[in-house]
Image: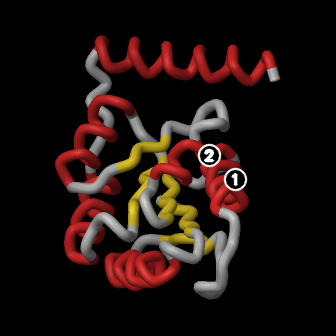
């Protein structure tokens, strides 16, 4: 499993903690930036992670102040299913029911312990592949593709 991880300045510190966790757990990952907590524009990093997931990374992790901007930006890419999760329970639901492939976290709204537990749950949870969930994910993908065609 290979993971792409990125943040903005507000999520930089938590990103570094998550990288330590991923390394300790034996996950392979690529840090898409930034390299410091200097102010940056979150859509640039959402784009890098989204393109990495579409290009072969199994999962992405994005962190900004609220998680909202990253999830909105990443979800502009057809095939990306970015879920803003502020608890392990939401991460489990996002993976099981929606086959989320990008986890978004809000560094200002989640403590480190909960964030790491959320990451662990997201990465370990499988998509259920129940017919109703498969049908719904297919519909989401069709909507995303139709939107992209209009752009």
Q: Position of residue 138 (x, y in %)?
A: 49, 17
Q: Is residue 79 above or below residue 71?
A: above
Q: Residues within 10 Å of mark 2 (few under 14, many from 20)?
A: some
Horizontally, is 103 left or right of 131 in the view?
Answer: right
Dots 1 and 2: beta carbons under 8 Å?
yes
Q: Position of residue 36 (x, y in %)?
A: 62, 87
Q: Nearer the viewer, mark 1 or mark 2?
A: 2
Q: Mark 1, residues whose alpha carbon is within 10 Å: few (<14), some, or many (≥20)?
A: some
- Which one is nearer the viewer's eye here, 3 or 7? 7
Whether residue 106 sits left or right of residue 39 in the image: it is: left
Q: Dot 1 lies on which element?
A: helix
Q: Quadrant of the C terminus?
A: top right
Which residue is at the front of the view, 109 or 130? 109
* Vertical arrangement, residue 64 with respect to residue 9, above or below: above
- Locate residue 125, reporting x and y percent: 27, 47
- Residue 4 is drawn in which quadrant? bottom right
* Dot 1 or dot 2, earlier in sequence: 1
What residue is drawn where x is 35% and y is 80%? 21
Residue occupying the point 36% across, 31% down: 98
Q: Mark 1 and mark 2: span between their CA atoms?
A: 7 Å
Left of 14 or right of it: where is 151? right
- State the residue position of label 2: 73
The image's colouring method is secondary structure
Q: Secondary structure at mark 2?
A: helix
Task: Say which of 136 and 14 sits in front.
Answer: 14
For disc 1, the marked residue is 47
Q: Residue at x 42, y 71 (%)?
A: 27
Residue drawn at x 47%, y 76% as measured from the top left: 15
Q: Residue furthest left?
A: 89
- The picture places residue 112, in percent across and down from the top left corner, at 27, 77
Q: Quadrant of residue 78?
A: top right
Indicate left or right for 69 with 21 as reference: right
């Amino acid at each position: 499993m290979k993971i792409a991880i990125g943040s903005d300045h507000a999520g930089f510190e938590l990103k570094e903690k998550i990288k330590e966790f991923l390394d300790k757990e034996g996950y392979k990952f690529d840090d898409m930036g930034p390299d410091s907590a200097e102010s940056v524009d979150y859509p640039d990093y959402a784009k890098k992670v989204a393109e990495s997931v579409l290009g072969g990374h199994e999962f992405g992790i994005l962190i900004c102040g609220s998680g909202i901007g990253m999830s909105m930006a990443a979800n502009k890419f057809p095939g990306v299913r970015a879920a803003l999760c502020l608890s392990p329970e939401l991460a489990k639901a996002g993976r099981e029911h929606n086959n989320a492939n990008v986890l978004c976290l809000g560094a200002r709204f989640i403590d480190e312990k909960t964030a790491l537990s959320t990451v662990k749950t997201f990465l370990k949870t499988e998509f259920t592949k129940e017919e109703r969930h498969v049908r719904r994910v297919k519909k989401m993908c069709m909507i995303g593709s139709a939107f992209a065609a209009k752009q």
